[in-house]
Image (cartoon, grey):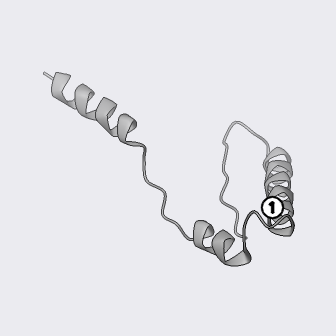
Amino acid sequence: MTDFLEIKCLRKKEQERILEEVEKKIEQKIKDGIFTVREVHEIEHMKLRPLPDILDVQSVYAKLKI
């Protein structure tokens, strides 16, 4: 799994620890049958998009520009 997490306020070691925890939880969910390996790969390759409410807030501010 590629590194997908970057939190600029955290040190590299802290980010690595969080990534390890996430990977362990994903592995456990695969073992428990919650996810299949294929589903994890599909999720891994999904393109993330902003939530609609965030887009709405940005458009409100764009309209307020004078």
Residue at position x 66%, y 78% in the image: 38
The image quarter in which residue 9 lies: top right
- Residue 55's spot in the image, x, y percent? 33, 39
Judge by depth and name the residue closer to the eye, 31 or 26: 31
Looking at the image, which residue sits at the far bottom?
38
Is 51 placed left or right of 1 in the picture?
left
Judge by depth and name the residue closer to the eye, 56 or 62: 56
Name the secondary structure under disc 1: helix
The image quarter in which residue 63 lies: top left
Judge whether 57 appears above or below 40 on screen: above
Judge by depth and name the residue closer to the eye, 60 or 30: 30
Residue at position x 82%, y 53% in the image: 16
- Residue 48's spot in the image, x, y percent? 49, 57
- Residue 59's spot in the image, x, y percent? 24, 34
Number of dots carrying numbers? 1
Quadrant that contains the C terminus:
top left
Is 17 placed left or right of 51 in the picture?
right
- Residue 50's spot in the image, x, y percent? 42, 47
Rate crowding at label 1 as few (under 14), some (14 to 19) or many (20 or more) other CA atoms within 10 Å: some
Residue beneath disc 1? 29
Residue at position x 48%, y 63% in the image: 47
Q: Amino acid at mark 1?
A: Lys
Residue at position x 75%, y 63% in the image: 34
